[in-house]
């Protein structure tokens, strides 16, 4: 008969943490010398940790923060470095990148400075998305703080997509504010 590898040794081993299992196989009590062995199994019950489900709207807002927080800092950083080197905006697919807003009229140096700050704000949007994904209220609070700064850059660089997505994200967060912990 094959021996169970999880059985305790037969040498009278005593486990101080689980005395009811000492010297017997795990899940079985060792029978007394003159008694018939009873097959009693220990049942292990694990207490389930309640998982707070994230609301649908917070999930959508989190995804939107990821969708703007990943590409915008990369593209803005590239554009700022290009302007720093060439003193003009790059043309991508026939469109001047980040051109047309009032920040472009301030000159190349201001465009680089504002671009790098905008890249930092965009990177913070990744943190907002991560915190909202965990259904944390501090993600919603940071989103509210970043909104005016982001809107300044969206208008300043004339970015219509984020100008539409930004208020929508705040509305989605506000609709489920009480579910955030």
Image (tube, rainbow, N blue to C red):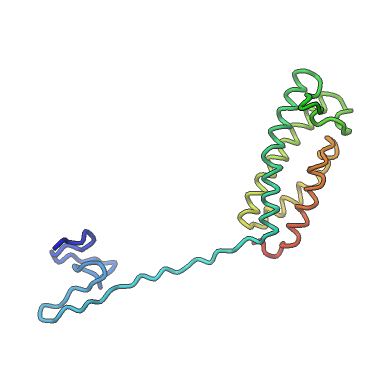
State which quadrant residue 101 falls in. top right
Instruction: State the count of labels.
Output: 0
Name which residue lies at 18% across and 67% down: 23
State which quadrant residue 39 falls in. bottom left
Name which residue lies at 70% across and 53% down: 61
Residue at the far front: name it: 93
Horizontal arrangement in the rendering, residue 20 relative to residue 57 (left or right): left
Quadrant that contains the C terminus: bottom right
> Residue 89 placed where, x, y %?
80, 24
Horizontal arrangement in the rendering, residue 170 relative to residue 23 (left or right): right
| Depicted 83 relative to depicted 75: above or below | above
Horizontal arrangement in the rendering, residue 30 relative to residue 90 (left or right): left
Name which residue lies at 69% across and 37% down: 71
Name which residue lies at 66% across and 55% down: 59
Q: Nearer the viewer, residue 90 or 136?
A: 90
Residue at the far bottom: name it: 35
| Depicted 68 relative to depicted 179: above or below | above
Quadrant that contains the N terminus: bottom left
> Residue 115 placed where, x, y %?
77, 32
| Depicted 5 relative to depicted 92: above or below | below
> Residue 159 placed where, x, y %?
82, 38
């Amino acid at each position: 008969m094959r021996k169970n590898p999880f059985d305790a040794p037969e040498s009278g081993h005593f486990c101080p943490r689980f005395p009811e299992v000492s010297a017997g196989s795990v899940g079985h009590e060792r029978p007394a010398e003159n008694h018939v062995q009873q097959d009693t199994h220990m049942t292990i019950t694990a207490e389930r940790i309640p998982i707070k489900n994230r609301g649908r709207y917070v999930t959508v807002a989190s995804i939107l923060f990821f969708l703007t927080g990943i590409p915008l800092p990369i593209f803005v950083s590239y554009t700022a470095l290009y302007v720093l080197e060439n003193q003009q905006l790059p043309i991508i697919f026939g469109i001047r990148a980040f051109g047309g807003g009032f920040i472009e009229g301030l000159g190349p140096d201001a465009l680089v400075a504002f671009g790098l700050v905008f890249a930092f704000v965009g990177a913070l949007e990744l943190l907002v998305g991560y915190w909202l994904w965990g259904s944390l209220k501090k993600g919603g609070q940071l989103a509210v703080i970043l909104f005016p700064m982001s809107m300044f850059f969206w208008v300043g660089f004339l970015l219509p997509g984020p100008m539409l997505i930004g208020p929508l994200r705040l509305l989605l967060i506000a609709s489920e504010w009480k579910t955030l912990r």
